[in-house]
């Protein structure tokens, strides 16, 4: 039977990579949201769309970390941190580029976001303003914190289910292997349970019946 690995180190590495990918995708979604129909972005004040983005981020992180068949319970809270951090990083990155592009473009030349807007100058110009929402009172910033909490909680639950399933499967495999190793050896129907005790061989020069003193 192969050695049981906890999957801690691969899970941490894959989790970081998936969080970076999720943050990049979310940042692009925030930047290009102006290209979506107004009915979609304005529906429910934009909360359903943002909540759906939170679930997508959580799904990417949880599926990526679950692909390494993790057994370590430590990865469960780490997945929540990765998903919540990816959500915040994506929102800040996309908002920074959007704000920087707005500040550096004359009003007459402004239009929908384009790939040419993704520059380091725009990001640097808008970065001081993007995290302002998280520094506002909770009565104002509750929506942003809600999206982060939903992503973190969803990733935590998804990876918990994955870890529990992997641990159960490996326990079942171990029990099956132990049962196979403890099975009695097969014997023929008339074969004795124990081999007969071998009789000592007699020497030709040893008398058969020795007299006792």
Image (tube, rainbow, N blue to C red):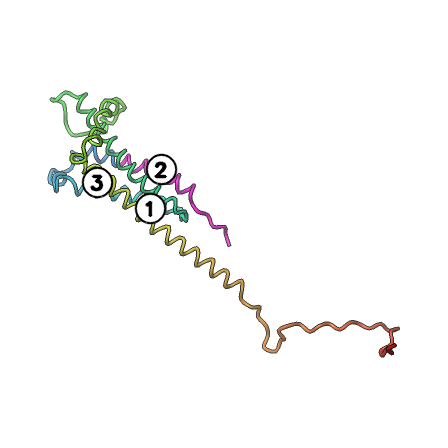
Q: Position of residue 104 (x, y in %)?
A: 19, 21
Find residue 139 and name its label.
none
Q: Is residue 129 above or below residue 185?
A: above
The residue wearing badge 3 is 146
Q: Position of residue 110 (x, y in %)?
A: 14, 25
How many marks do you count on the picture? 3
Q: Residues within 10 Å of mark 1 (few under 14, many from 20)?
A: some
* Quarter holding residue 123: top left
Of the pair 109 and 56, the residue shown nearer to us: 56
* Quarter holding residue 31: top left
Of the pair 85 and 42, the residue shown nearer to us: 85
Horizontal relation, residue 194 to residue 28: left or right? right
Q: The magenta stretch spans which residues?
A: 1-25
Q: CA distance from mark 1 to mark 3?
A: 22 Å
The residue wearing badge 1 is 63
Q: CA distance from mark 3 to mark 2?
A: 24 Å
Q: Position of residue 7 (x, y in %)?
A: 43, 45
Q: Position of residue 28 (x, y in %)?
A: 24, 34
SS at circle 1: helix
Q: Is residue 47 above or below residue 202?
A: above
Which residue sits at x=28%, y=34%?
24
Which residue sits at x=84%, y=72%?
203
* Quarter holding residue 130: top left
Q: Nearer the viewer, mark 1 or mark 3?
A: 3
Magenta stretch prevailing secondary structure = helix
The residue wearing badge 2 is 17
Q: Residue 32 in magenta?
A: no
């Amino acid at each position: 039977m192969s050695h049981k690995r906890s999957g801690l180190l691969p899970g941490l590495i894959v989790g970081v990579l998936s969080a970076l990918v999720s943050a990049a995708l979310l940042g692009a979604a925030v930047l290009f949201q102006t290209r979506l129909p107004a009915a979609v972005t304005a529906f429910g004040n934009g909360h359903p769309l943002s909540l759906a983005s939170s679930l997508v981020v959580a799904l990417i992180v949880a599926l990526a970390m679950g692909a390494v068949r993790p057994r370590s319970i430590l990865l469960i809270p780490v997945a929540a941190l990765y998903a919540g951090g990816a959500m915040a990083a994506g929102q800040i990155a996309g908002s920074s580029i959007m704000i920087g592009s707005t500040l550096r473009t004359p009003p007459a030349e402004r239009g929908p976001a384009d790939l040419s807007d993704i520059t380091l100058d725009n990001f640097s110009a808008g970065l001081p303003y993007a995290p302002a929402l998280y520094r506002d009172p909770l009565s104002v910033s509750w929506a942003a914190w809600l999206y982060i909490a939903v992503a973190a909680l969803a990733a935590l639950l998804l990876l918990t289910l994955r870890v529990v399933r992997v641990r159960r499967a490996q326990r079942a495999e171990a029990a099956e292997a132990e049962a196979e190793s403890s099975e009695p050896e097969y014997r023929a129907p008339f074969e004795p349970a124990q081999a007969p005790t071998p009789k000592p061989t007699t020497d030709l020069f040893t008398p058969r019946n020795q007299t006792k003193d």
